[in-house]
Amino acid sequence: MAGALEFVARGIRDPQLVVGAGAGMRATEGLLRGATESMTLEAFRMSDTRIVEAVSDRLAAKVDVHVLADPEEWARDGISRARLEPEGAHFERFGNVPDKLHSKSAVVDHDRAVITTSAWVDAMRDGWVDLSVFFRGDAARALEHLTKVSGTGDKAAIRSAAVEAARHGVLLNDIANGVDVLHTQLLTMINGAERDLTVVTKRYEDPGMMAAIEAARDRGVKVTVEARSKPWHANVVIADDQAYVGTAHITKRSMVGGGSNGRRSREIGVLIDDAATLAQLREAVAPGAALPRGPVAERVAGAVDHVAPRGSRRRTALIAGGAVAGVGAAGAGALYLTNRR
């Protein structure tokens, strides 16, 4: 990107990782219900009954509520604006169609926050497995400022806020406003990997990212790439002693813009270098990992049905069949896992 930002990203401090079907939603609801002064949200969708009730309850208690919302969901009220705005919530629309707000986060009382891969809709409680990272302190305040300034359309202010947020472990991609922090950090992690690299997401369609993964394999890094579809709903990159968890797929739309219909998605995530959380994350993304119990989690635990070894012709067929879109030559020599569709 022309005029790409210069920044220093550091791991988020004292992260709390929540894994599982509905667990992140319940924890987020608890976070919101604990607000006493303020609540700042960015919402791709926000129609989950209990999340909306939690926001409404806090509005009745005179909590100041700000919501940065996706423009398409704004138009069709996928964010419960028709209910919450008359109750006192302040809504700001993120840009215009075809730009998308795919990020999901919340900050309460200028101190406690979550970044999650879960859309706040009823179906996400039982139909999907997400990852949510809870944190507090300076990182929460940096996220709050970033969310609020993003509703102003002031590109210089947004870029400055994104650089500051990265210093506290919050990574933003907002190509419409000239921010490619998340994309740049992922490339830095992948290009710098020396021992092992694990990528788990739904779609692999960005040529630059795939080239970086292929280059890691070629220099001897142990590379694991997994395509997971429903009920898994999270994006993870682990490179040696750092990890990313967030909303961005490995697609042009999420990474650099210019995807289908010219879409550019606002995406958000966290940088993790805490050893205990990294171990928890590695366990969570392992094939056949035991997730919190429940009907969906039990299906996920047995979801991986094939491990394609190095040099396997079967692997190519699996990729060509749609398990990993657009991987192409990056499959040669790498270890790929695929799930039932």
Image (spheres, rainbow, N blue to C red):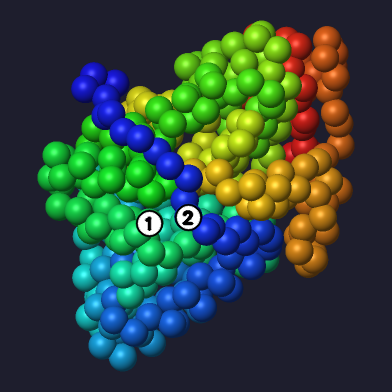
Q: Residue 25: give its label.
A: none
Nearer to the camera, 207 or 36:
36
Asked if 83 appears above or below 312 in the picture, the reply is below
Q: Distance between the residues labelled 2 and 1?
A: 8 Å
Structural crowding at the residue carrying mark 1, measured as other residues with C-alpha within 10 Å and reported as few (<14), some (14–19) or many (≥20): many
- Which residue is located at x 41 percent, y 69 percent? 112
x and y percentages locating residue 254 in the rendered image: 43, 34
Nearer to the camera, 120 or 32:
32
Q: Which corner quadrant holds the C terminus?
A: top right
Tag count:
2
Tag 1's secondary structure? helix
Structural crowding at the residue carrying mark 2, measured as other residues with C-alpha within 10 Å and reported as few (<14), some (14–19) or many (≥20): some
x and y percentages locating residue 93 in the rendered image: 23, 55
Instruction: Judge depth for marks 2 and 1 and give the one in front.
Output: 2
Q: In which quarter of the image is residue 323?
A: top right
Nearer to the camera, 306 or 143:
143
Report the residue marked by disc 1.
139
- Which residue is located at x 48 percent, y 55 percent? 13
- Which residue is located at x 43 percent, y 76 percent? 32
